[in-house]
Image (cartoon, rainbow, N blue to C red):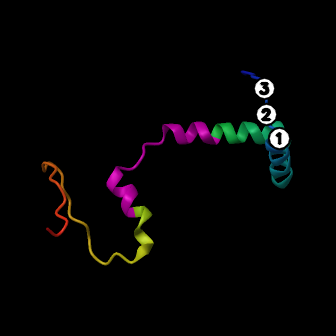
């Protein structure tokens, strides 16, 4: 198993990690391992396409109709009410 040292970690970050570990009933070292494992898992997960991410972000705003798809169309400047 690999080991590494984290230097210059701020005291408040260490304190928050310690409290988090206590809430989860484990050592601070195990808490950090769990955080790193989860971060590495997310790195391999593919991101949704940009349109899907935008739609998810605004899903609760009350948009009542679907937005048109523009796959394969050339970009054009916006018309701002001339």
Mark 1 surroundings: few (<14), some (14-19) or many (≥20) residues within 10 A:
few
Residue 2 sits above or below residue 31 on the image: above
SS state under label 3: loop
Residue 16 sits above or below residue 41 on the image: below
Residue 59, image x and y in percent?
41, 69
Boundaries of the magenta span: 38-55
Q: Quick check: is 39 in the magenta stretch?
A: yes
Residue 68, image x and y in percent?
20, 64
The residue carrying mark 3 is 7
Task: Assign the magenta stretch its main secondary structure.
Answer: helix
Dots 1 and 3: beta carbons under 8 Å? Answer: no
The residue carrying mark 1 is 14
Residue 45 sits above or below residue 52 on the image: above
SS state under label 1: helix
Q: Residue at x 32, y 55 (%)?
A: 51
How far is mark 1 from mark 2, CA to CA? 7 Å
Work out which quarter of the rendered image holds the N terminus and state it.
top right
The residue carrying mark 2 is 9
Mark 2 surroundings: few (<14), some (14-19) or many (≥20) residues within 10 A:
few
Q: Quick check: is 12 in the magenta stretch?
A: no
Residue 11, image x and y in percent?
85, 40
Q: Earlier in the sequence, mark 1 or mark 3?
A: 3
Judged left or right of residue 38, residue 46 is: left
Work out which quarter of the rendered image holds the C terminus and state it.
bottom left
Dots 1 and 2: beta carbons under 8 Å? Answer: yes
Q: Quadrant of residue 6?
A: top right
Q: Residue at x 27, y 75 (%)?
A: 65
């Amino acid at each position: 198993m690999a080991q590494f040292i984290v230097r210059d970690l701020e005291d408040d970050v260490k304190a928050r990690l310690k409290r988090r570990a206590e809430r989860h009933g484990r050592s601070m070292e195990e808490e950090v391992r769990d955080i790193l494992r989860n971060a590495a898992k997310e790195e391999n997960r593919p991101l949704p396409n940009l349109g899907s991410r935008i739609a998810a972000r605004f899903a609760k705003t009350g948009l009542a109709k679907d937005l048109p798809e523009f796959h394969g169309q050339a970009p054009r400047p916006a018309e701002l009410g001339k």
